[in-house]
Amino acid sequence: MTLAEVKLTDDRPLGPAILRGVQCKCPACGDGPMLERYLKVRDNCPNCGEDLSHQRADDGPAYLTMLVTLKVVTPLMVAAMFAWDWHPAVMFGVFAGLLVALSLFLLPRFKGMIVAIQWSRRMHGFEGANERQR
């Protein structure tokens, strides 16, 4: 099978799946919520019934969250250090609060994105029932 044939037969395109995952929506239908609580992935989509229990996000969302938050906040902290003469306690409070807020915002979105990528690429049991029989 050539790359062109694979692109023509891709019934789970990666781009829309990632967008749905970042929105914490079901990667299959885009309507049902993927997360049951803050980070708990539902076993099934309440809207379309897609089985999401196969996901294996593990530590990926945490690593991505640390990478992005530290790459964003560290330059801001250095710039603020040179631009303003803040007391160290104020500097710590502002940037620790920014790190916590950004981390709490990004973590479920990265988890949704990783689950959506796994669903789109048929990883970890996300292949369809008809594909398992082959």
Image (tube, rainbow, N blue to C red):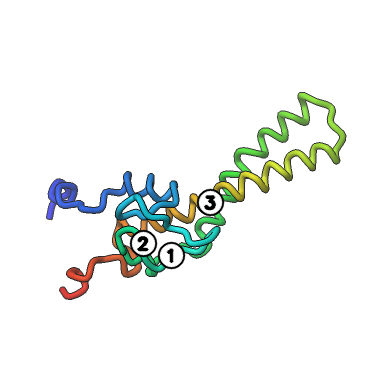
Residue at (55% x, 52% y) in the render? 107
Reading the image, the residue beneath label 3 is 64
Residue 44 figure quarter: bottom left
The image quadrant where one finds the C terminus is: bottom left
Reading the image, the residue beneath label 1 is 42
The image quadrant where one finds the N terminus is: bottom left
> Which three-letter amino acid code belongs to the residue tagged 1?
Arg
Viewer-closest of 3 and 113? 113
Q: Secondary structure at mark 2?
A: loop
Reading the image, the residue beneath label 2 is 45
Residue at (55% x, 58% y) in the render? 38
Q: Secondary structure at mark 3?
A: helix
Q: Are marks 1 and 3 in contact (CB under 8 Å)?
A: no
- Name the outermost residue toward the bottom: 133
Looking at the image, tell me whether mark 2 or mark 3 is earlier in sequence order.
2
Whether residue 78 sits left or right of residue 104 in the image: it is: right
Q: Nearer the viewer, mark 1 or mark 3?
A: 1
